[in-house]
Amino acid sequence: MKLLRDQSAALRARLPLAYRDGMSRGALRGALHLGLLATLPRRVTDFVRLVAILFAAVTVSPAPTFAGEGGRTSKPVVSIENPGKCIAPAEEMRRNHMEMIKHQRDRTLRQGIRGEPASLNGCIDCHASKKTGSVLGQDGFCQSCHEYAAVKLDCFECHQPKSKFKPAAQAAATEMGRKP
Amino acid sequence: MSQHQNPRRAFIAAAGASVAGLGFTAIAPGLHLMAVGEANAAPRPAGQAASPAIRWGLLIDANKCAPGCTKCIDACHEENGVSEQMPDPRQNSQWIRKIELVDRRNGKLTTLPMMCQHCAKPPCVDVCPTGASMKRADGIVLVDRHTCIGCRYCMMACPYKARSFVHAPLTEQTPGTPRGKGCVESCTLCVHRVDKGQQPACVEKCPEGAMTFGDLNDPESVISKRIASANTTQVRGELKLDLGVRYQGI
Amino acid sequence: MATLNPRHEEGLFYALAVLGGAVSAIGLAAALYMEHSGHVVTGMNNQIVWGLPHVFAIFLIVAASGVLNVASIGSVFGKKPYKSRAPLSALLCIAMLTGGLTVIMLDLGRADRLMVAATHFNPTSVFGWNVILYPGMYAIVAVYLWTLMERRMNPYSKVAGLATFIWRILLTTGTGSIFAFLVARQAYGNAILPAMFIIMSFAWGLAVFMIVQKTMFGWNDMTLHAAIRGRMKNLLGTFVAAVFYFVATYHLTNIYFAKQTAFEEFILLSGGIFPVLFWVGYVLVGTVLPLLLIYVPDLNRLRGSVFAASTLVVIGAFCLLYVFIIGGQAFPLEIFPGYDVKSSFMDGAIDHYSPTLPEALLAFGGLGIAFTLTTVGVRVLRFLPQDDIAELEAAGSIVD
């Protein structure tokens, strides 16, 4: 298992400030500055202040949950179980994989074009962990990096994250077929 | 639902039915040779889009459909990984279901499988706000789950109740059939098999050979010839939706 | 309320705002729970696909459009007594629209994909039109409010009022068309529905307006001038009767068509909860009693009779929508005429729907949002209708 620390550091540097330092400071400062609103009628300011304080409370509270050890997110685990077969250099994949599979998915689903180089199942076949068989999980190829970059990973609400997965019922039927 | 039945018993029943069934030969356990319908075609070459010259369709002979048999449902659910059981069975996905019809005039019992009818003018496609409900060039009606927002308007609009809403998170999907919580789904005519030149799972596994799959646009196809010679019906034909699925014997 | 001193009054306002906020927050939490677990935690299923949230949301959206009628009567049809009510009517419209749309959107299977709905547009879908009509309503009402509140913009208020009126008619046409364009189910697919929804919006919107107006007047220890009260109650009566006319036409047409008689028999006689809600909830409570309260002189002279009539109209509205939306789905689709049908999926069988707690909380959350926005809105902004009786009498707008 190989950790690509340099890439993750680079990725981290590109993230907006808010992700690195948590959002708490800005929100608190905003709440304090509401003092300026004192010139408005009291009824309005009271209400605005109440809303602002509630908002600040909501914004601040989840910050410690998102930040990992020492306020920092843990590094992604980027392990490639089946290396050397990728359809493009790692640099390009890292930057453009979503565009690639997004365009492919639309062509495949809507126009019925099959056999394109980019495919989610293709990704999964090479990148699924040998231990869990999946690209998800704490050390999963997709999940760990997406969690680190705080980018929502929506594919696996519908797509199967395990390589060559057979549902229990189907596996049993195939098994019976092989050994009567 | 019977997909959780003992697999051994299911297999033995399937093998037995294959031996006895019309037009089927069991050459090895678990492997059926189709003698009716069309042989598997060549897969569509990589990079080639589905052709509007083709209109995929099904012909279902209700006279041959055996009451109580659920092989097509089992095949569909196995192929597409539809295995989840909700506490309330009305929340289960029903890609294909068996309907029992009793003629009110003479009490005659007919059974048939009902699924997405793959309309040429599908109401589900008309009503979908995001265009997720779509018809492919070769007539297969699909849901693009990447843009389905789960509003269920298509389920209100479908005259055949062919669509289901996934009511809970799923983990047992097959790699070939992505499906998940919060989206609407229905029979895909096994589009992933059809594109490989295979037949839909239900057609292949029907022990009675009651289902024929093929190109409705090709006058030389088995399905077209049968429709030309036999008396076939489009369900709720008065809606003039021009269905891809036709029935015999109702 | 005359005895309230300012401190108690302020306390009561905060209590109401907190109550409304709490109901809204619980509704949002319920939606989050539904989103997380899937709709398995609701009573909705693959036969009854729209449930209680849709009943509440459609009431709020239809009434939101209708409540704007009050403003239109003032600016488009030039009836003076309604002019001072335009700002409140616009505020109520925005509040209810927000409540209704929030419920509809949070009930989506993929509520997280709101951006998809905004960026993918299917021109043949009535829902697609609504994606344009509903946000457009906000914009137009906001502009209309601006022309009303900003003195320099006042000259444009008539044009803005007319635009709002047209947009509102289109919007409710869109809501009615959601059902009118469905061929599949017996209850829907009927061209009378868009028109019926428009007249329903008139009645329900005015009823909601009367309730809010009465509450605000009571709060401020004011009474509505008898002549204005008389005009508004008569208008409500006309609308309620008109809704009944449309509902009766819809059912009578269906009864006349042989293919629809089984469905009508179900909805009006044999369908368990649905006939009860229709006859008792809608016809008796929501139509007959309000009309008696409005038109029988001995009754309408009673204090609070118009308020009571308006409340009953709203209760009747919920009953009618429940029968229309849930009842319409509970009845099986007629897929094989001439056959008795049975399957694993409710073919040929009446479905029954029992809402669960999460979806009920979401539905009430919509009411909570509308209530909170209204309560806070009328507090922060000066939207209390002020009638200059002398001026109205001089203009001949009110006659005792």
Image: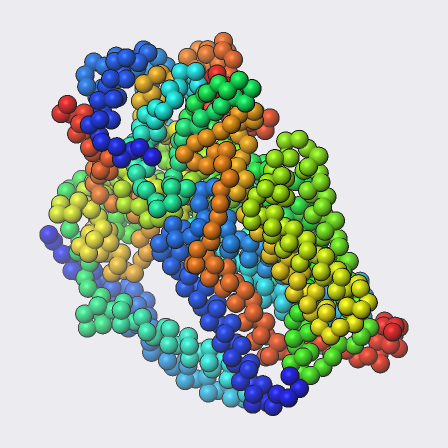
Q: In the figure, residue A102 lies in which quadrant? A: top left
In the rendering, at what x and y percent does residue C295 appear? 80, 63
Q: Residue furthest left?
A: A1
The colouring scheme, among rainbow, by chain, secondary structure or one colour, is rainbow
Q: Is residue A150 above or below residue B153?
A: below
Q: Residue at x 72, y 81 (%)?
A: C222
Left or right of A29 on screen, residue C101: right
C94 vs C343, nearest the viewer = C343
Give me the residue at 26% from left, 32% from top: B5
Tally the numbered discs: 0
B20 or A129, which is in the foreground? B20
Q: Which residue is at a point 65% across and 75% down the rendered structure image? A: C215
Horizontal relation, residue C360 to residue C177: left or right: left
Residue B60 in picture, x, y percent from top left = 43, 20
Q: Is residue B68 above or below residue A117?
A: above
Is residue C115 visible from the viewing direction of this image? no
Is residue B15 visible in the rendered image? The answer is yes
- Give the image location of residue C3, x and y in percent: 64, 88
Q: Residue furthest top?
A: B229
User: What's the residue at 56%, 90% (across, down)?
Assistant: C7
Q: Position of residue C305 (x, y in %)?
A: 72, 69
Q: Quadrant of the C terminus of chain A?
A: top left
Q: Is residue C42 left or right of residue C55?
A: left
